[in-house]
Amino acid sequence: MSNGAHALMNTLVEAGIDVCFTNPGTSEMHFVAALDSEPRMRAVLTLFEGVATGAADGYARMADKPAATLLHLGCGLGNGLANLHNARKGKVPVLNIVGDHATDHVPYDAQLQSDIETVARNVSPGFVRTARSPETLCRDAAEAIAAARGLPGQVATLILPADVSWSEGATPCPPLPQPQPPAADSATVETVAEAIRTGAKTALLLGGRALRAPALEAAGRLAAHCGVTLLAETFPTRLERGAGLPPVERIAYLAELATLQLSAFDQLILVDAKAPVSFFAYPGKPSYLVPDTCTLHTLATPEQDSLASLEALVQALGAGTAEPPRQPAARPARPRGKLTAEKVCKAIGYRMPEHCILVDEAITSGLMLNALTAGAPRHDLLTLTGGAIGQGLPNAVGAAIACPDRPVLALVGDGSAMYTIQALWTMARENLNVTTVIFNNAAYSILNVELERVGAEGAGDKARAQLDISRPVTHYAQLARSLGVHGTRVSTTDALLKALDYAWSMPGPHLIEVMIPESLTGLKRKMLPWLLRSLPSLPRPLTRALKRKIAP
Amino acid sequence: MSNGAHALMNTLVEAGIDVCFTNPGTSEMHFVAALDSEPRMRAVLTLFEGVATGAADGYARMADKPAATLLHLGCGLGNGLANLHNARKGKVPVLNIVGDHATDHVPYDAQLQSDIETVARNVSPGFVRTARSPETLCRDAAEAIAAARGLPGQVATLILPADVSWSEGATPCPPLPQPQPPAADSATVETVAEAIRTGAKTALLLGGRALRAPALEAAGRLAAHCGVTLLAETFPTRLERGAGLPPVERIAYLAELATLQLSAFDQLILVDAKAPVSFFAYPGKPSYLVPDTCTLHTLATPEQDSLASLEALVQALGAGTAEPPRQPAARPARPRGKLTAEKVCKAIGYRMPEHCILVDEAITSGLMLNALTAGAPRHDLLTLTGGAIGQGLPNAVGAAIACPDRPVLALVGDGSAMYTIQALWTMARENLNVTTVIFNNAAYSILNVELERVGAEGAGDKARAQLDISRPVTHYAQLARSLGVHGTRVSTTDALLKALDYAWSMPGPHLIEVMIPESLTGLKRKMLPWLLRSLPSLPRPLTRALKRKIAP
């Protein structure tokens, strides 16, 4: 028997949760004090809760188990919501521990009093619980962990009142048995197999865990044996890719392209993925992107074991000995001259080290990255699953802690970077092997694209000013240095390549700010050929009207 | 008739809401486009939503009317929750406009889809509404504005689906009549007057709008005529103070001191304030701080007009011609030598310009500020009403926009500053007259205090490391420069005084980082005499045990 905090700490580490991303306050001080009694728990301090939650997301994507967060009441949780949203949409397991006032203190409505369960509900719909006593706390925690770890992975929130934390009477709870998620049943497998056997043009749409190497191998056998095309959801939680792995084609971000891409198929088979919908709504345009002529099948839902389901399909179709197509090794040529977004992506493809973890939140500047890193050495790609920007830097923190021996490369737009810029400090404090590339075009470029796309009439200088972050231009390299991270600003490809090599040769965090003051028109012009290279399924040739729409 | 966005813009400015703190995304593009059709609306871009909401809070505290925020779906609102919490606790009117997906797009559960009403509920319990059509939008907006502006002021959240924004058919709605809030009824006034007439030792506890000059004048007459003591809530939304104004004594933050302070009174009369409770709960200590021997009366609730209520009480007690006590002008002597938190507060008291707006989020480093600025020229003090740190810099942005002719001085702890550091960029962009002083002691000092106070046993190096932000020490002056703000780091009083004079003589934002590497023990030792100066009601002499508790 011990106090709640100590027993909880033990319960966590016994369940394998041995990393906690923290931003504590007074109500969490007993949990903090309990850290010294548990050498197995690593506590990683962040200066803002959005860093803690985004790091927990990135950690779990790579470690395949949840980290804990330690957050200060409803306000701390509030600051962490955006990255918890990304984790939720990515089906990533996260365990939030949110301190609360002592139970007796709640009715007094003190300054920090708020309705934490309500704050948590949206990101943590499957599990929000307030611990009511030290005696029941650890069982609550074990259930929260089991909820987070089940399929689909989810955000579970355990609210820990200060008195439950400080009171005696708690006993650690061993981990609950984690039920094996089911594979697709044989009838489903047979239905899907039969659909493929018809010879109709078929794509498998892979999402979630179906984008890991073992699932890609199985899917690759189907591609080789049955001629199905492998598609991936637009924003994968974690995609294993690069030379030697079976390649997959991501659904395009632009709705017009995605619909065209899907029009090449008679049937779409969902594997831990949902049917594609557009990111935003646009006046007069459909949200649902699957053409009427395309039949949907579901092989595996997010609740099911997608790998086992794919393997069952491989067996059903007799594809067990087929050799998957493999991405050939290929890097772009060395870029030269003044930097542009295209050349930055080229430089990364040209130089990316082996086993890199690539965190992509480069938004418009990263549109060419997919094509330019396709044949780079094998790597993992983490993307913006929920669309809540500010995910890149914290995800990189978490990934680096999950995989200390692998280089992490975070590609972040200058707009996105500012939401959780405090992550740089944690990179410095923990001496993480993260190289951050900030694309400084001094604009919310994506909004310049969207402003046209939504058909907003009458937008003039005042509206454009809302998308312009050039007055002042943030100096990210200087900003990095102020937070203890080695920072360099570059504007030529030579300088960028030198900075990348330096970053990869020196342990610890580095930030490279690439100055790419090109116009959006310029970017769009260069973007098109690279985008098309990533979309081999797209029926060719494109109409002139569509080309103008994508890259006027 | 026009589209929803244009009609909404007109509705806002006709109701006097002519400042909007923004961080828009795609779903808000039509609102952004409508900015160009309404020259009266000032849109202030922020790089993070917590800056937008905190700026709206600071703006409304000074302008006495709400600003709008423009936030991007549930995730944008999530990022703004902490400072909306502060506004809610401070009874400050704010109008959130939160863009949402188009109504038809919602069922598709796209990446950014979330339950915005749930996210809003905790900070906006009195008014959350999703606009359902362009025809009803402007009425919804007018009702939201009326809800925000009523007494007590509140956060009202209007959710604006993209299609309601872009569709035609909207008509602006004129402002709704704003009912005059009632004063205390005559029976209540008479009851309170009778209680005062008994001659029992009485304190008026003033909060909310009762801390503005006119209410202080009325309360001051009561102090002069009836001998009542004027107390203020611990964290005022906006306190007018300084030379020439009736002084009020704030309730101490430390619960032990607050209880002792209140023990000097037989009765406590609440005026737009709640009975004091401790900020946090501590094991074995009461949350409610009013001694049993002290009777509570309520003159005016937050729903009532506190000024009219106080004036009615003045009349009932025949105090109408009494001359209030007035704070004599007095500044501390010029500090000299190496900087400490005490000397920074002295320097500010020594130099503070007239009509300054003082935003205090200095936490431990500001504990002496109250005493050291009491006799400074008249100023407004804005404090951390809800305890959610990250309020100081954004509040300063809003205050500066509300009062462009007044100097704004933001005093911020290094821990607090990082939550919403993006505010510096908006200060630069808008060239705001804000001088920020960051107290860099490289620690969450308050948590070192609290770790002892909550009696957390067994805290060792690992726990202490969670409160230590010295590896690396953030360089705030450099950070400011990276965001376009003039930044200086100082470690002597001479340099600080020079930097303050420079900042006040040159328009635009300045940041002065004061290096105060002193130990917490050192701070606590110096703090006690200044703290006691701010608490004249405290029965003297203090016991040795209490002294040790406060400043061991």
Image: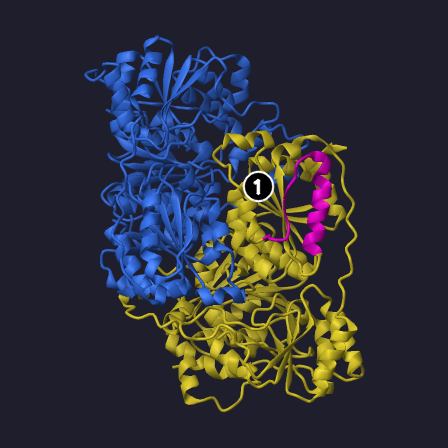
Chain colours: A blue, B yellow
Answer left or right for A92 relative to A542: left
Q: What stretch is highlighted in magenta?
A: B124-149
Q: Is residue B130 magenta?
A: yes
Q: Main secondary structure of the magenta part?
A: helix
Q: Which chain carries label 1?
A: B
Q: Where residue A394 sits: x, y (%)?
A: 38, 46
Place residue B324 in its image quadrant. Answer: bottom right
Image coordinates for residue A167, horizontal then vertical, percent: 35, 67
Tell me if I can see residue B551 in this picture: no
Q: Residue at x 53, y 88 (%)?
A: B539
Residue B380 image point, x, y percent: 64, 68
Q: Circle 1 is placed at which residue position? A: B24
Furthest-top residue in view? A199
Q: In this view, does B397 lie to the left or right of A402?
A: right
Q: Is mark 1 on a helix, strand or loop?
A: loop
The residue lying at 54 percent from left, 61 percent from top is B392
Q: Relative to the observer, which residue lies in front, B484 or B46?
A: B46
List x then y, in percent, for residue B175: 77, 48
Taking the image as drawn, is residue B453 in sight?
Answer: yes
Quarter of the image that includes the C terminus of chain B: bottom left
In this rendering, the answer to whether B303 lies above or below A141 is below
User: In the displayed structure, would residue A490 be above or below residue B550?
Assistant: above
